[in-house]
């Protein structure tokens, strides 16, 4: 595709529910990142996928967060038993290689009531 | 450990004034350096990047940045700021030690522009 896409663009859920966020990276990009951005804050690294290597999960804030990536394509970020502090914009970015320029998606705005 | 610092959390400048945003990094390899901008309600956009060669790089929107290895810095500059430059600016660093190395972002600097 022309760019990184994310779905849904907005998600409102109730506390305790599970949510799944999707990211479609640019074709051919081997690296994929997930970030969280709370209102007025910077980028909080969550997880990094690079090719077929084991993902770098060092940024996941708790075991309620998990992510998967199918080969070098779609990735899903799952948040189980959502809490109000999970409310944020979740950004996905892809790059040709891990150390290269990142192309960001528009984000998914998650609101937990 | 690798790290990126942006010492200024928030900067306010007058329209037409010059701008310099600071970025310092700690990285155990020759770095790849990036500046991104996030305008209010907008996505992140690459302003410029440095991989090698000339240490002064030009970017979009009239921005430039200079890589100074001796100071481990990659400061962003603009000679005359426009009101539309009000945004959040992020410095980022990567390195090609292995194909697995990832890019690290700094905490960001928020820029306000006074008319």
Image (cartoon, helix red, strand yellow):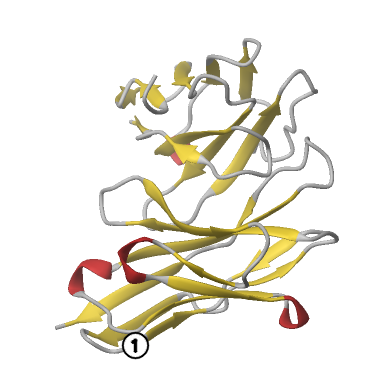
Total label count?
1
Please give the chain letter of the residue carrying mark 1: B
Tell me if residue A60 comes above or below residue A69 in the rendering: below
Q: Is residue B66 visible?
A: yes
Q: Quadrant of the C terminus of chain A?
A: top left
Q: Position of residue B41 (x, y in %)?
A: 25, 49
Q: With A52 as the anchor, is B20 left or right in this view?
A: left
Instruction: Tell me what residue is drawn at x 59 percent, y 34 percent.
Output: A33
Q: Which residue is mark 1?
A: B18
Q: Quadrant of the N terminus of chain A?
A: top left
Instruction: Tell me what residue is drawn at x 24 percent, y 78 percent.
Output: B113
Q: Position of residue A80 (x, y in %)?
A: 55, 19
Sort mark 1 into few (<14), some (14-19) or many (20+) by Cα contacts within 10 Å.
few
Tell me if residue B26 comes above or below residue A32 in the rendering: below
* Residue A5 sits in quarter: top left
> Looking at the image, which is closer to me, A42 or B20?
B20
Q: Position of residue A12 (x, y in %)?
A: 30, 25
């Amino acid at each position: 595709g022309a760019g990184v896409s994310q779905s849904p663009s907005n998600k409102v859920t109730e506390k305790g529910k599970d949510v799944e966020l999707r990211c479609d990276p640019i074709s051919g990009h081997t690296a994929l990142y997930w970030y969280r951005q709370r209102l007025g804050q910077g980028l909080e690294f969550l997880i990094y996928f690079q090719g077929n290597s084991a993902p770098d999960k060092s940024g996941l804030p708790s075991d309620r967060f998990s992510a998967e990536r199918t080969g070098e394509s779609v990735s899903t970020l799952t948040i189980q038993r959502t809490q109000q502090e999970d409310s944020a914009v979740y950004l996905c970015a892809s790059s040709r290689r891990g150390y290269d320029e990142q192309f960001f998606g528009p984000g998914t705005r998650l609101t937990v009531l | 450990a690798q790290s990126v610092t942006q010492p200024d959390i928030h900067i306010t400048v007058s329209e037409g004034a010059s701008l310099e945003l600071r970025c310092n990094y700690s990285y155990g390899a020759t770095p790849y350096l990036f500046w991104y901008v996030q305008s209010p309600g907008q996505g992140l956009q690459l302003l410029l990047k440095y991989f090698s060669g000339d240490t002064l790089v030009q970017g979009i929107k009239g921005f430039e940045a200079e890589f100074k290895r001796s100071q481990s810095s990659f400061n962003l500059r603009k000679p005359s700021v426009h009101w539309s430059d009000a945004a959040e600016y992020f410095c980022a660093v990567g390195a090609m030690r292995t194909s697995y190395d990832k890019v690290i972002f700094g905490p960001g600097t928020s820029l306000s522009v006074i008319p």
